[in-house]
Amino acid sequence: MATQQLIVRVPEIGDFHDVDVVEVLVAVGDRVEREQSLIVIESDKASMEVPSPAAGVVVALALRVNGKVNQGDAILTLEVEGVAATPEKPVTATPPAALSPATGGPRAQVLVLGGGPGGYTAAFRAADLGLSVTLVEQGATLGGVCTNVGCIPSKALLHVAEVIEQARAMREHGVDFGEPRLDLERMRAYKDGIVGKLTGGLAALAKARKVNVVRGGGRFVGPNELRVESASGAQTLAFDHAIIATGSRPVSLPGLPDDPRVMDSTAALELSGPPKSLLVIGGGIIGLEMACVYLALGTRVTVVELMDRLLVGVDRDLVRVLGKRLEARCEAIHLGTGVARVEARSDGLYVSYDGPKAPPARSFDRVLVAVGRRANIEDLGLDALGVELAPRGFIPVDAQLRTNVPHVFAIGDVTGPPQLAHRATHQGKVAAETIAGHRVAFEPTAIPSIAYTDPEVAWVGLTEEQASSAGIAVKKGVFPWSASGRALGMGRGEGTTKLLFSADDGRLLGAGMAGAHAGELIGEAALAIEMGADAHDIGLTVHAHPTLSETVAFAAEVAAGTVTDVLLTKR
Ligand code: FAD
């Protein structure tokens, strides 16, 4: 068979010079396919894999790892089979994306701003659909708030807290492990190790998908251009479509002292201390999760919440299960109370309160402010894009995640509540698929929420209070965990599972659970809502015994009137 030798060269790489060769992916003798990556090159701003222009066998390598290359330099010689013998002619690999006349660099079909769960999911899905993708992230790692300073580190610490509490609880049942000796350094290393594993995995996934990850803060400077600035310089990137995924940050309370003892959730996850006393301002999910962590570590915790209840928006019967346990463990929970003033003194933070039930002022070693999160919309150059904001300061989008500008999309926390990682990831996929030409929409019937407190509270779809205020007739099935063998075996019979079915067509409209590991049960209810399941569908599905998941089936049986594990009260 006729063969031809091709010299494969470094393609057009814009203004970059003396770029590092960070990986050589093939060796002499290897057979490579067309488009197979040959080398990875990296400048201080971006990394790029160079694909093979043809299938063949590598007969010579012209460069090595850690070397420097420029456009046109030879990479390797390829023996290409099945080509009529013609005079040997050097060939150049095609660039991975069209070039932008404005910037000289590769023009991305999709530019994603922000590498959190929304952003990296959108970037990966777009790349999997064959689009050229640039992902811009100002942080040191991908993963955003969720992976670096949110969902993941908080759940690692909540796991530690759970084990401590379980060990304490075992005293009652004949096993005394003694008081735990805390090594905060190792605890932090455990948490940071999990975060590192996940962020490292994301970097590898980005690389494997040939997503061009650019480090730096991005600002739009035109309808199709983003300026990225980092410590090592600035560059302008051109794009066809943009996905804004810049997330959110904690809301800070005005008038609080600038003092390291006043923490936001990120500082609280650092576990410096633990303090003897902590005031948590805000009785929402993040505040109460961190309260549970610090309670397990032995801190005396007080919670203050402006509204007259914890976990606003969740049915009171579910919150009561958590409230009872927290009341027994916290120093105090002040509802319907605001913080009037925090004064930083050398011996503590002196806090005075506002409101009819305001307790006397007192001092705390630390204060955690967890009063909500606000969308990152500032300094993005949205004017240059023409993107409009909602009055409440987030980017409104349609079911395809399009902003008012047709080629610009927004996903995740920057699009407003509910600010949850799983909402961001699903939105990311829909945005990427829409850009790729698919006819898709982000229209979930329900999005589950979980407070990973002790005990957990989880809910999805319609709440009982929403049903009653909207005049929606529902049929309710409640199963108390005091009748669940599994819950009792875990020493956690205080939980409850509630299902709300439509009085009209019998479909499940909403569900809520409070109890140990309740968060693991909510997925079944979410699926049942999406599938239009009724009480019989759920109750007749055989659930393994003894499991907490049985409480979902039993609650459905309560609604259907077929339950045998509890006595039904006559209505
Ligand atoms: P983010 O995760 O906020 O990511 C946005 C990214 O954009 C960031 O990495 C940021 O650096 C980058 N960025 C912003 N502006 C620019 C710019 N101009 N240039 C370049 N990069 C930029 N959610 C859950 O669903 N479950 C949980 O258990 C949970 N626990 C949480 C616990 C805590 C303590 C906190 C704080 C949050 C928690 N959340 C949880 C919320 C969750 O973290 C967010 O909903 C999720 O991270 C939102 O994802 P996102 O992609 O929209 O944005």
Image (tube, rainbow, N blue to C red):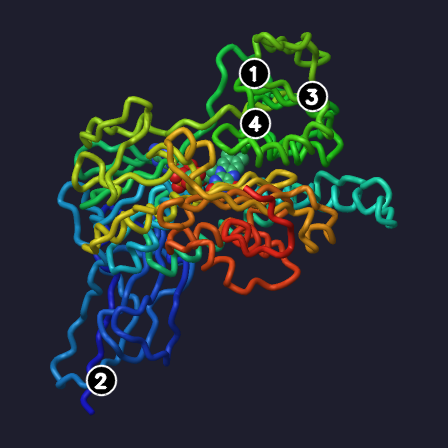
Identify which amino acid the numbered label 1 is placed on. Answer: Gly
Residue 250 vs residue 297: left or right?
left
Q: Measured from the top left, where is residue 11 in percent x and y?
A: 23, 59
Quadrant in the picture for the C terminus: top right
- Number of marks present in the image shown: 4
Question: In the rendered image of this protein, does residue 546 appear above or below residue 348?
Answer: below
Viewer-nearest of discs 3 and 1: 1
Identify which amino acid the numbered label 4 is placed on. Answer: Leu
Classify mark 2: helix, strand or loop: strand
Viewer-nearest of discs 2 and 1: 1
Question: In the rendered image of this protein, does residue 29 appear above or below residue 341?
Answer: below
Quadrant in the picture for the N terminus: bottom left
Spatial CA span between label 2 and label 3: 78 Å
**Sequence order check, earlier mark of 2 and 4:** 2
Report the residue marked by disc 4.
Answer: 310
Report the residue marked by disc 1.
Answer: 336
Spatial CA span between label 2 and label 1: 78 Å
Report the residue marked by disc 3.
Answer: 332
Spatial CA span between label 3 and label 1: 13 Å
For ligand 1, give the image quadrant.
Answer: top left
Residues at badges 4 and 1 in contact (C-beta under 8 Å)? no
Neighbourhood count class around disc 2 (C-alpha, 10 Å): few under 14, some 14–19, many 20 upward: some
Residues at badges 3 and 4 in contact (C-beta under 8 Å)? no
